Amino acid sequence: MTRGVSVLTQVHRETPEAETRPLSLRLIRRLFTFTRPHRHTRNTLLVLVLIRAMQLPALAWLIGRVIGGPISGLDPVGLAIGAAGYGLLALLTQWTFYYRSLYALTLGEGVICDLRKALFRHLQRLPMSFFQDTRLGRVISRFSSDSEAVRAGVQNVLFMSLVQAGQMLFAAAVMAWYDWFLFLIIVLMSPGIWLLTDYFRRQLSRAYRAVQESFSRVTATLAESVGGIRVTQGFVREEKNAGLFFDLVADHSRFNLDAARAAGVFIPMLEFSTQVFVALVLLVGGRRVLQGQMEVEHLYQFILMSGLFFGPIQALGSHYNQALTAMAGAERVFHLLDTPPLWTDPPDAADAAEVRGRIEFRNVAFGYVPGRPVLRNVSFVAEPGQTVALVGHTGSGKTTIINLISKFYLPNSGDLLVDGRDIRMIRTASLQRRMGIVLQENFLFTGTVLDNIRYGKPDATREQVVQAARKLDCLDLIAELPDGFNTRVGERGAGISLGQRQLICFTRALLADPRILILDEATSSVDTLTEARIQKSLATLLADRTSFVVAHRLSTIRHADLVLVLAGGEIVERGRHETLLAHGGLYTELYRQFIRSADGGQPADPLDSVRHPC
C-alpha cells in the first residue's frame, strides 16, 4: 500500500493481520465439526473420493493390458472386449466425477451456510465496544471473501487433494509392483519436484495474502464511503475520495498481477520439470527393456503411471496455495466467532418477570478504556413512573448512563439495581424486552413503515399499530406518506425524512409498551411544529413508565421529576427544573447559554425553542 488506508479520514490504524497461515490441524478439525450436520453427504463423498482415486490408475493399467495383450497378440476379439471394458470404466469414471463434484458442492454450501449463520448469530451478541473498534468492511469481509475462501477449501481443495493423493498412492503401488528399481528412481526424483514446488508455493502464498488484504481494504473503504456519503458531498470531497479509492483499486490490481506473474512462472516450471523426469524414466526404463530386465508392456504402463504420479504433485501444489488462503480465511472467521462478549449472564441469573422500574445507581464508576473513567461515583434513584432528565455538555457521561441502564455495558465498580436486584443477576434479554429506546439517530430497517413499528412487538395487529400512532397524535403524519403504513423504507431509512423516522420510532416504542423508556436526544431532528405536537403526546408515552431523557431541547425536560446535571462524569446538581434555575449553578448557566443562542428576541416560552449546544 502506498496511499492512505481510509478514503474518508485516512486515520484508521487497526492491528495488521498475519500475511501467511500454514496448514493447521486445529483449524481443519474445527472446520470438520461443521460437516457433522451433513454427515451423510460427507461420508458418501469420502467413498466417492476413494473410488475416484482408483479409477484413473485403473484406466492407465487397462490401456497397458490391452496394448500388451490383444494388440500385441493380434487378437481382435480380445481387443473388442478390452475396448468395451475401457469404455465402461471410463463411463463409470465420469459418473463418479459428476457425483463427487455434486456432493462436494453440496457439502461446501451446507458448511458455509451454517458457518455464516453461526457468525451472524454471534455477531448479534457482541458488545457495543466491538462495533466501535472494528471497521464495517472487516466484518463484511468475514462473511464474504473469508467465507468464500473457506468454501473453496471445503469444496475444492480438501476432497480434490484427497483424490490426487490417492491417485499417487495407487500409481505408486502399481509401479512398485512392476519394477521396484525404476520406482526407486522415481521416488528419489520426487523431492526435487517437491522442493521446487515448495519454493514457488511460498512466493505464491505471500502474493495471494497480499491480494486478500488489499481486497479487504477496498471493501472496508467502500462501506465507509457509502455510509459517509452525506458528509462527503457536504464537504465536496467526491473527487478527492474517488482518487484515494482509485489508488486502493490500483493497488489491488497490482497485487493480483503480481500473484498471476508468480503463478505464470511456477506452473510452467513445474510442468517442465515433470516432463524432464518422465524423459529420464523413459531413458532408464528403455535401457532396462533393451537389457531384458523389463517388458515393453510394463514400461508403457510404468510411463502412464509415472504421469499419474507426477501430475498430482503439480495439482497438489496449486491446492496447497488455495489451502493457505482457506486457512487464513478460516482463522479470521473463527477469530470473530471466538471474540467473547464483554460478559455473559451468570447461570443463576433470573428473568425479569415483573419490572416496576425502580433504577438505582450506587457509587457507579465506568470507563470504556481502562484508566480513562467516564463516570465517577454516580449515585441516584429513579422511582417507578418518574421521568429523569440528564443534562450536561458533550462528554459529561449522559449517554454512558443510558448505556449502563440498557445493559449494553456493566459498571466497572459500584452497583446498578433494577427493582432492588443487581442488574448482573437479571437475564439481559429479559430486561431489554421491557425497555424501549428512542435514539437521536433513529434506525429503520429495510421493509415497510408497518414492519418497523412492529419491530419490538412482531405479533401486534394493524389496528394496534394505528392506535399507537393515534395516541401519539401522529397518525395523520404517517398517513401522509406515499403509501401510509405500507410505505417502503430504503436502507437505513432512505426515503423517509428525519422527523418522520423519529415519529415512527416513537410509535414503535409506545407499541412495545415498555416499563423503562429511554429517550436519547430523541426530538433533536423534529421541527418545532412537530415537536409541539409530540410534547403533548409525550405525557401519554411517559405515563406510568420510568423514563430517562437525554435532552437536546430543554423543552423535553421541563416537566421532569428529577434533573441530573453532569460534568466530568459526576453529578454536580440534581433537582427539578425550577429549583435548579433558582439555585444559580451550572444548570442556570446552561440555561442562559441556551437563551443567548436563540435567534431573535426572547420567546414567550424560551424552553420551547432553544437548543442544547451539545
Image (cartoon, grey):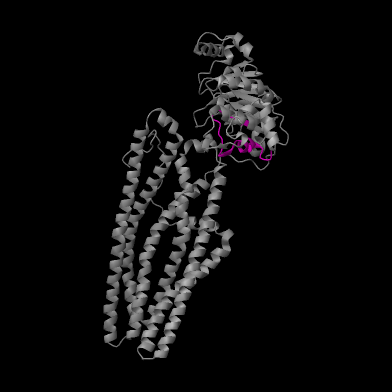
Which quadrant is the N terminus positioned in?
Answer: top left
The part of the chain drawn in magenta is 436-460
Counting from the top left corner in percent of width and height, residue 434 is at: 67, 34
Q: Nearer the viewer, residue 88 or 552?
A: 88
Counting from the top left corner in percent of width and height, residue 34 is at: 55, 56
Hey, which quadrant is residue 564 in on the image? top right
In the rendered image, the vertical position of residue 551 relative to residue 405, given as above or below: above
Hey, which quadrant is residue 135 in on the image? top left
Taking the spot 52% from the left edge, 36% from the top edge, the residue there is 492
Q: Nearer the viewer, residue 284 or 588?
A: 588
Taking the spot 39% from the left edge, 51% from the top edge, the residue there is 20
Counting from the top left corner in percent of width and height, residue 83 is at: 42, 83
Is 465 left, or right, of 172 in this rendering?
Answer: right
The tally of labels here is 0
Q: Nearer the viewer, residue 524 or 322?
A: 524
Q: Which residue is situated farthest in the right direction here?
A: 354
Viewer can see residue 398:
yes
Counting from the top left corner in percent of width and height, residue 22 is at: 41, 55
Taking the spot 46% from the left edge, 75% from the top edge, the residue there is 91
In the rendered image, the vertical position of residue 217 relative to residue 321, given as above or below: above
Residue 451 among those drawn in magenta: yes
Viewer can see residue 16:
no
In the rendered image, the vertical position of residue 330 relative to residue 458, given as above or below: below
Residue 240 among those drawn in magenta: no
